[in-house]
Image: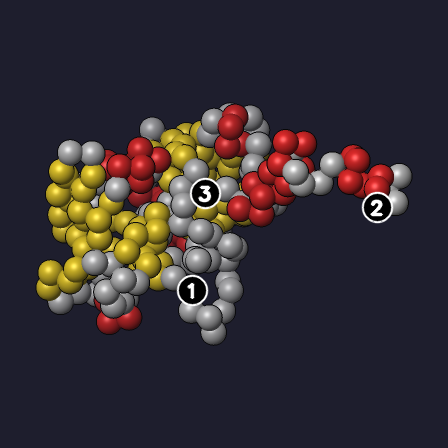
Amino acid sequence: MFTGIIEEKGRVESLSVSGTSCRISIFCPKIFSGIKTGDSVAVNGVCLTAALFPREGVFAADVMPETLRRSNLGQLRSGSMVNLERALPAQGRFGGHIVAGHIDGTGKIVSSRPEGNAVLVTVSVSPELSRYIVEKGSVAVDGISLTVAKVSKSDFTVSLIPHTAGETTLLERKPGDMVNLETDIIGKYVEKFLRPDSGGLTETLLKENGFF
C-alpha cells in the first residue's frame, strides 16, 4: 500500500520492450538504499516489484502487458522523469490517502494555471472513472495524492501547493500528455457492495434487520 506522498523524482535509464511487456530501469539515488529485492515501488503510481539492481542507485522492474495497457509507462523513454514512492511501512506516517498502486485508467492534461501560491491543473477523464471522483475527495494522479477541487463528467481539477509542484513531475506535463489515474478504492468497494447482484447490502437485507 502507498499514500501518494512522492519521495523522489527518478529518471528512467532504459525501457526494454519485449513483445507486449517490458523491463524498466530507474535511477533513484535518494531512496535506493531503502530498496531490496522484492520490494514494491510505485512508479508514476504503478506498483512495481524491484527485481534487479544493475548498478548503484538503479533498480529494475518487470512490467506486464496489463500494466502497459492501463498506464502511461509504455510511453516513457530514457531520460523521462517519474514519481517514486516506496510502500508504506507498518510504523509509517499516513500522510496522503489509501493508494493501492493499481491504475484504473489514464487521463490527459487539459490545462494548468496559477492561482495565488498554487497551480490549478485540469485533467480529462472518462465518465467511467469520473463517477468515482468527488469534489474534496482524493485522487492519485501519476501516483500523487491530490484533493479534487472541481469535477465534471469529462474532467476534474486539482490544486498543487508549491511543495507538491516542486517535488513531483506533474507541472512538467503539457496539455495532451497522458497521466495515470487511481480513484478512491473505498468508493469502488462501497459501490460493489451496494449492487443487488453482489449479495451485499440490499433493501431486503435492510428490512430483515429492522431498518424499514
Under mark 2, the amino acid is Asn
Q: Is residue 31 above or below residue 101?
A: below
Q: Residue at x 20, y 34 (%)?
A: 20
In the structure shown, which secondary structural element does the residue marked by tag 3 occupy? strand
Q: Nearer the viewer, mark 1 or mark 2?
A: 2
| Marks 1 and 2, how far apart at CA | 38 Å
Q: Nearer the viewer, residue 167 or 1?
A: 1
* Pointer 3 residue: 182
Mark 3 belongs to which amino acid?
Glu
Percent position of residue 161, x then y: 47, 53
How far is the residue under mark 1 from the one under mark 3?
Answer: 17 Å
Disc ID at residue 88: 1
Q: Is residue 185 visible?
A: yes
- Labels 3 and 2: the sequence-earlier one: 3
Residue depicted at 30% across the width and 63% down the height: 39
Residue 43 vs residue 196, the one in the foreground: 196
Q: Give the residue displayed 24% in from the left and 58% down from the top.
A: 50
* Res 149 quadrant in image: top right
- Horizontal side of residue 106 vs 16, given as left or right: right
The quarter of the image holding the N terminus is bottom left
In the picture of the structure, the residue carrying the numbered disc 2 is 209
> Does 104 sit left or right of 34 as displayed?
right
Q: Secondary structure at mark 1?
A: loop
Count the labels in the image: 3
Neighbours of disc 3 within 10 Å: few (<14), some (14-19), many (20+): many
Q: Earlier in the sequence, mark 1 or mark 2?
A: 1
The percent coordinates of residue 210 (x first, y second) are: 88, 45
Q: Do the CB atoms of the residues marked 1 and 3 lie less than 8 Å apart?
A: no
In this rendering, which labeled residue sits more in front, label 3 or label 2?
2
User: Residue 38: x percent and y percent?
Assistant: 27, 62
